[in-house]
Amino acid sequence: MLEHDVLVIGAGLAGMRAAIAARAGGASTAIISKVHPVRSHSNAAQGGINAALTDRGDEWEDHAYDTVKGSDFLGDQDAIEVMCKAAGQALIDMEHFGVTFNRDDEGRLGTRAFGGQRRARTFFVGDFTGQALLHVMFEQLIKSGVRRYEEWFVSSLIIEDNKICGVMALEVRTGQIYAIRAKRVIFCTGGFGRVFEPSTNALICTGDGIALAYNAGAELMDMEMVQYHPTTLAGSGVLISEAARGEGAYLLDKDGNRFMEKYAPNMMELASRDVVSRAEQTEINAGNGVDGCVYLDCRHLGEALIMEKLSQIREIGIDLVGCDMIKEPIPIRPGMHYAMGGIRTNVDGQTNLEGVYAAGECACVSVHGGNRLGANSLLDTIVFGERSGNHAAAACRDTDYVEFDVDKAVRNEEKRIQDFLDRPQNGDRIAAVRLGMGESMNRNLAVYRNEEGMKKTLVELKELEKRYETVPIENKGKVFNTDLVFALELGFMLDIATPIAMSALDRKDSRGAQARTDYPNRDDENWMKHLVIKKGASGPELSYAPVSITQWTPEERKY
Amino acid sequence: MDVKLRVQRFDPEAADPKPYWEDFTAAIEDNGTVLDALIKIREDTDGTFSLRCSCRSSICGSCAVRINGHAGLACKTQAKDMLVDGVITIEPAGNMPVIKDLVVNFDGFWDKIMQVEPYLKPEGPEPEAEYIASNEAMLHLSDVTSCIMCGSCFSDCTVLEVDPSFLGPAALAKAYRFTADPRDGDENGVSKDRLEELNKPSGMWDCTRCMECVQACPKSVAPMDRIMAMRDQALQAGFHNTNGARHTEAFSDSVEHSGWLDELRLVPKSVGMTNITALVGYAPIAIQAITHGKMPPIIHKKLPQSKNIRKIFDKVEGPEQR
Amino acid sequence: MKYAFFPGCVSRGGCPELYPAAKLICEKLGIELQEMPAASCTGAGVLQEKNELLGDTLNARTFAMAEALDLPILTICSTCQGVMSQANHRLKNLEYRAKVNTFLAEEGLEYKGNARPKHLLWVLIEDVGLDKLLSLVTRPLAGMRLAPFYGCYIVRPTEALEFEDHPERQDALEKIIETIGATVVDFAGKTRCCGFPILTINERNSMAMVGKHTSEAKDLGADAMITPCPLCHLNLDSFQPKAAAQAGRPIGLPILHMPQAIGLAMGLSPDAMGLKRHIVSTKPLLTKIGAGAAS
């Protein structure tokens, strides 16, 4: 019997940090991930990690205020305080673990400017900070003695009497189904970017954990808040880091004008992401772009700076669109990037389900509210990953495993999977249904939204769910059956697409990432509240939760 | 644009499992990548086709395959650049057993990474704040830590092809990432324990300097260059008692003193002048060489002006440059 | 057509038959060679592992000598080619070159960055031209199946070797084989390592490499293997019997340094090409092309 006090699902930064903390807290700990840990999407965070270091004359309160303002006052200020207070130590811990942060002239950690912040407090490793952090975290995971289930896909949760007992998982390499018993389960499964097409997100970002938790009765929060990143590459839509603008790059329209002066005269290109993305979209819609894109111009930064600090995104431009940013502006556009919303948790990662935790992008604490600041996501993963791991380990000490019929659980799951495989081969292809969903979401739940479009998407999602019931699985084998995995992932994505669209339709104001053309203003009187969505007997059920306000009174947002 | 691909397939559950070739055509954008084409095959043509891929932007390290015989990331390679007689040939990465189609078993790869104890091991006390280190040192390390563990170097390593016990380019580059880290090891940043381990057989001296890893690496980690730098670290740290170290020093000595290579003396100096067994082992080769008129000259003549070469050695190897 | 000649150490040391063979065919091709007697070893990548700056300085010294002669450099050694190209690539950096030049000043030398070291293989294709080579072929090696063995240094890393500007370098050896009338035996090992650099460090692995590549080519029906590198030649020929013993199978594949094969096709005598000094007998090969066995 596979059995662990704490089982962490997902081995990105949040997951590994949680597992290391739980192990250090004395719990027998395992981590399970559908990909090898270093393949996780934390890799893709490029620009850096925020922290206010007091020995640099920075204060956590300033960082917290920038974060609150960035969230368009929808972030919970108590949670934001927790994150920003912990940031300095979290950063130093990562440095001590071995991250090769860029330095200043005195050999101390160097910073770069980032969007929506009044001072440079973003610590970085070139333009591959996430990858640097992820690999170092994996080193620490190796050292910690946490059991790793690599390339195991969690297909369902085992819940008895509303209590978590463990998970069912498919070992992808063999096709075997296992039950893994656990006292505490921590979801660190990342975002749901692939619900949208295109997206900066990796192909693995299918919101599995959010869907699993939602289907088990967990509350989701802020699901309408989907961040469109201002600089995603033409075509494939992969990310071009905000670090480019942090280092001084310009955004230009088709005539070479720096249009941001119209939208954010003080912060210009470094306004918060929602503001910049809206500005770009407005310009593109007004015909001031080229082929649906505007330009990111790095030429004046010079070759030396680009090679030292932006070399990876330069390569991406060359590899994918044949454009060298040293020599020419590169075509970019706003693109789906990050989920502010997710599984609702408190500051210790606890959800409304006993024994179930969440941290990182799949969770909603909510520290990002309506719009996440660049370089706050890496911080979020590390701070709340650690807190979840600590809390779960402590909670295990006087808890027993919940008994369940293991054989029956395995048999049931095997049958469910076999039924999937045995489907007739006459339905639509998996990819066609996924593309239908992604394009509908990107059409109607993008930078600008309105009631008509969102309603249309909700109707389309219903049709797609029907089509999903008959998607065939061509691969009948057991060994590395990615066809089966994609089918299961598509099911998860469809499970959460509707809650996203429903939440967005329900919120009748414009705030953070949600900009409604039919409700263009922020309406604090009626909508200064979180949307919470939960699976009910007859579909998703919406409710509201207050926003925590500690010391920063909501005000009009200007950059 | 339609691209033709010739893909090596393997189904371990087939009645008679063995690799076979299958041809596909995939419609992709003109500047589409090899990965775009492979995904097209999987999504539109054949759902049984398995490969790993995720980020599409050269950072997750999932999609290393052999493209026209050489390892690289499918997502970093433009399809139009890879057409040879109108076809792109795709095989799974090498030096790892195939699980299914393009999916290979990385266990051997990771075992070697684990062998180098891949985490920072400072010997002194941790500072309260960050370690103070120069930006230059960190940038140098970042070139190495930008390794994404994709296995391209491992796939094409010529030593691993004949000797699975070799640590291999990825693990050695990972080790260098620590031996070159001013925070690792003693107060001077010297990681003597690591170097001692890496100095053993199957370690740094077994690299044959073929540069396959330098060519294959999609992230400019240049593993072989790191291995060479590590050899210097080992020599500097006083590890001279290996054939590799002796070979390097004898070679260097020969060039320093004569300007060119004294092959006759290089062999015994490398295996060790007191290593009688090994020396006897070379006797038949030597006799063969003599009988075929191939013996290098017994008297190794110095090049004209060889003292100038010696002076360069003094200057470049001198304390000022070190 | 005149070049500063850089033969490298092995063609004068461990395989002394290669140097005169190369000189002879150059003469036939109308290539004038000016020796640089004071030019040092390139370091062969070995010196570089001890101290890259030192290796680059020695190569910059050679480049400066060739610049002083106002001649391009010709080498017959792939390893020398690779090491020189890599050094030259690094020496494109002006700051670095200035530093290196400080070490050369005492000897009155300065490297200005204009050297373009070229292997005879590339010279044949890029400067001499295959037509010219073809016109000198009097005894085409018809019916002979030759396996090209590039080794490492003349194919990697492609950036330093400027393959982007010279795509023809990728299959230069195959073109030579076809021009001299032989048939190409393509095989997977052609750009792999011959094992020479680890010969004295890990002989088992070195022999495994020799055995793998020679037996692969042999099994594909090759009559001989042709290589542009004296180091590959040395290991693949001199150590082939030992490799065969380790592999537990007979191999017996003659290894020709590229100039030797060209010389044969030009009608030069097997003796002049040094073929009797090979460890693996070249007799069957010579019989096949009607050149008679080397005396």
Image: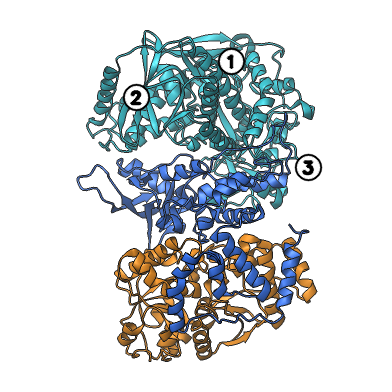
The image quarter containing residue A468 is: top left
Q: Which mark is residue A359?
A: none
Looking at the picture, how far across and down is residue A1, in whole percent?
A: 34, 22
* Quadrant position of residue C181: bottom left
Towards the viewer: A210 or A154: A154
Residue position for label 1: A347
Q: Are marks 1 and 3 on the same chain?
A: yes
Q: Position of residue A102 (x, y in %)?
A: 69, 40
Q: Label 1: chain?
A: A
Among the chains pictured, the one given cyan colouring is A
Colour mode of the rendering: by chain
Q: Earlier in the sequence, mark 3 or mark 2?
A: 3
Q: Colour of chain C?
A: orange
CA–CA distance in space, label 2 to label 1: 34 Å
Q: Which chain is drawn using blue?
A: B
Q: Residue at left 30%, top 49%?
A: B9
Q: Which residue was labeled with disc 3?
A: A105
From the image, tell me which residue sits under label 2.
Answer: A465
Residues at marks 2 and 1 on the same chain:
yes
